[in-house]
Image: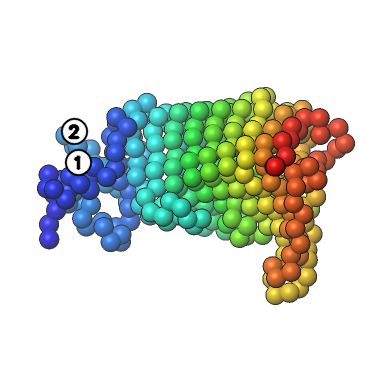
Amino acid sequence: MSYNQNSGWGQHWLQSFPSLGGKVFFVMRNTNANYDIATQIVKADPSGNLRLFTTPLAAYAQMTTNSNDVMYLFDSIAHTTAFDWAKNKCHLVGVGNPGGVFMSAAISTSTVTLVETLKVSGNYNYFKNVRIDQYAATGTASLYDLHITGTFNVFDNCVMDMCGVGNTLTGGRTLYFGSGGRFNRFINCQIGQGYTLHTAANAMIGFASGDAGHNRFDDCLVMTQASVNTHRIVKLDGSGVTGPIVFNRGTWMAYSYKAGGAGPTVGIANAIGGAAAASTMIILKDVSIDYLTGDVSDSTAKTGVYSNVVLATANQENNIMVTPTT
């Protein structure tokens, strides 16, 4: 059977992927079961520009900043060169199992050494139903999974995870807000999957000094597994972050175990740490913080917000506003 963009099926297929006023791009592997159909339906635009690609980087190169272009990603596709989402108002939507922890639409690194899997230095971008994974196998430079230096970006129902060497590096951060990374929002996202053991003094979420504040997390899950007590959920670097950081509802979960009944290992000592913690405002509203230690078959839980918001020095509690879960 043949398809075309003007047939009833072709129009139905294309109209399933709405535009926000700009161009629409499709990204899928050429081994995808729908790839042949897509090649018949998705034709070049009137200017001759292609709209169907096999890598996110190739599609991103065709997007126009400030045009509300949309990229629909159908598969998990790795890249081997740096990927900086530097354009404004260009959006990414994953197509697959949007409710899954291990989403089928993903941007990832292969085994190469890259500083980050994805850097977002642009502004006003929207990311939805996408998994971002770092799989770098070696090297000391693969520090971040998602690195944000842009503003006013939204991540909706996304998953970020460090599955590679970053878990063993002291400066590793699954999600890192560099200078300028402020006024971003995360909705129903998961940071970490607790699958790969963190073995160094790294963190799930990191903030650089200066303009890395005013970020908001709504209904997000942070999950980590650590074998050292210097690992942190949140790490504040340098001399302080300008503006508050808000965690509204959600769960922080840190656990450590040895498989096969070998007994407990060391759990993390503090949920929030770093030299800048004393001069940064962090607001936790209805956030449950759970520490689990022991073997998977015999774990013990300490729940409750106040007892587990433990910081590095005695006076830092003054900068943590906690609203307990009722």
Instruction: Tell me which residue sits at (48%, 41%) in the image.
Output: 156
Q: 39 left or right of 235?
A: left
Look at mark 1 in the image and give the residue it sits on: 44
Q: 33 left or right of 180?
A: left
Q: 214 left or right of 156?
A: right
Looking at the image, what colour scheme do you see? rainbow
Residue 215, image x and y in percent?
Answer: 60, 31
Q: Which mark is residue 290?
A: none
Instruction: Tell me which residue sits at (72%, 29%) in the image.
Output: 281
- Disc 2 marks a residue whose amino acid type is Ser
Image height check: is 260 above or below 178?
below
**Could you tell me which secondary element the residue under label 2 belongs to?**
loop
Mark 2 vs 1: CB contact within 8 A: yes
Residue 255, image x and y in percent?
Answer: 71, 58
Where the C terminus falls, by quadrant? Answer: top right
Image height check: is 273 above or below 224?
above
For residue 239, which quarter of the picture?
A: top right
Look at mark 2 in the image and give the residue it sits on: 47
